[in-house]
Every structure is written in C-alpha cells, then in structure tokens.
Amino acid sequence: MNYYNFNPTSSIISRIVAFARGDVNGDRIPDNIYLTGIKTPSSPFIQNITLVIQDGRTGMVTSIPLNENAGYNPTLFLGDFTGDGIDDILIGINSGGSGGMMYYYIYSFNNNIVKLLFDFDVYNKEYQYSVTYKDNYKVEVISKKNNMQYIIDISNKGADYLNEIYDENGKLKNPIEGFVNPISGLYPVDFDSNGVYELLAFQKIAGRYNADSLGYIQNLLRWENNKFVLYNQFVAIFGAEV
C-alpha cells in the first residue's frame, strides 16, 4: 500500500465527502481526518474514496488508499478501540448491493504510523456459517468460527411459506440450505464504559433467498493481543404478532 502527500483543497475532481477532527497520532493536538472521493454526476455513488489525515501540529498530510473505494454514504468515526488512549479511525462505506453489504476499515495512526486494525474482507472470510432447514419448522445455524449451534423456530412464518417447505407432518419436502450474508453493520459500543470501544457486527441470516430473512448474527468483538477477537455471539430473530 502506498502513502503519499495530498492537499484535500487542491483537487477539482476529488472532493471531501466526510470529515472528523480528533487526535489520532497521540500528540494531544487535534488532527483533521477526511474521506475524499470523486462524486458521480446526478448520483450519490462515489469513487476513489481515500482516507486523508492532516497532522494538526505540522500540517503534513498522509493519504491512504482503500482496497474497496467505491460506494455510497461514506462515514467516519473516531474512537479508541485498542485502549492506548488515542483515537482510531473507523470508515464505513455502503456497497449499494441488495444484500446490504458494507465495507469497513479501522486504522490506527499512532506516532504517525499507519496500521490497519480491521478489514471487513478479512472478517467475512474468517466468520463462516452454515444454515440448514430441519424437520418440525426449525432452522439450524452453525457458527464455524466458535463451533456454536443455534436453532431458529420458524413456525410463525405463515401457512403459505411453511406449506411450500414442509408436508402436513412437519417433514421437509426437500433439503434446503440457507446462508449468512457478509457484514452489514459494524457499530462502536463502549459496553463497559471504560472509554474503549468494542465492535458489534451484524450479519443477516437468510433462508431460501436473500429477502427471506430469518434473523441476524450479532458478533461482539474487542481488541486483544493486537487483533479483534470474538468475545460474545448472539442470534437475534424476528417476532410475530399475537
């Protein structure tokens, strides 16, 4: 990855699309943090999204290209994720796809050294699942990362839905496999109120097709031993009117 100087006010084509201010290099002087990109005429789509850090003390600028650098509504959040007392940089970009997939990166800039702490693509490859329909209106979800099993009761999905899948005895007519989408939400939450943020990651559980939503995997991550690790996991399901 290349880093190069860039003045966010000098380019006609590339514009500032998000801005935040905070101390990200640890010198106790607020820095200017930008996302820049090329806006598409008559469209909210933005290309060539780039992280730009301007040192608040020296004015020096560092530009960091992103692997996935095109999408919608890019956002910035500054907060301490590692516990060193210095703000890190959380970037979110909406892919615009039907599955609601998001691109997320977290960077550290401590002592003006760029370090990638979180990459959504690495996360998606690491957190894999299986979704299998079972007899008696149940769906089994297996989280392969931590060997956990979850059972979702889909008996409230409605007669039309269930009759397509099950016979009158609640037996599957044919084997059905669902799937879990890539990450669609990554939220900084300070669960223990100690000034250090954890991450709450959302992934949608889908049945026969993407719009057939069964619930969400919710993974809680925290920084340990120089990486984000899983420390809790939940499956959230949708309710039905009674």
Image (spheres, rainbow, N blue to C red):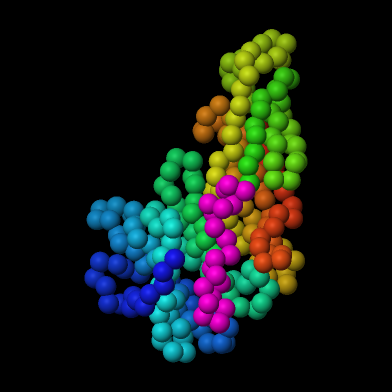
Tell me the residue at 71%/66% (across/down): 225
Write down the region rendered in magenta.
107-126
Q: Is residue 123 magenta?
A: yes
Instruction: Please say if 207 is above or below 220.
Output: above
Question: Could you say where residue 212 lies in the image, as x and y percent from the top left?
Answer: 55, 31
> Who is closer to the viewer here, 209 or 159?
209
Residue 97 vs residue 181: left or right? left
Instruction: Indicate the quadrant containing the N terminus: top left, top right, bottom left or bottom right.
Output: bottom left
Tell me the residue at 73%/72% (across/down): 194
> Who is closer to the viewer here, 226 or 207?
226
Q: Is residue 125 magenta?
A: yes
**Is any part of residue 164 visible from this angle?**
yes
> Who is closer to the viewer here, 147 or 186?
147
Instruction: Please say if 85 is above or below 82.
Output: below
Tell me the residue at 71%/26% (across/down): 138
Q: Residue furthest front?
A: 1
Tell me the residue at 59%/58% (across/down): 187
Instruction: Please say if 240 is above or below 42.
Output: above
Instruction: Please say if 232 is above or below 237.
Output: below
> Who is closer to the viewer here, 126 or 1?
1
Question: Could you say where residue 186 lies in the image, as x and y percent from the top left?
Answer: 58, 55
Q: In which quarter of the image is residue 32?
A: bottom left
**Is any part of residue 24 visible from this angle?**
no
Instruction: Indicate the quadrant containing the C terminus: top left, top right, bottom left or bottom right.
Output: top right
Question: Could you say where residue 69 lies in the image, as x and y percent from the top left?
Answer: 40, 58
- Counting labels gives 0
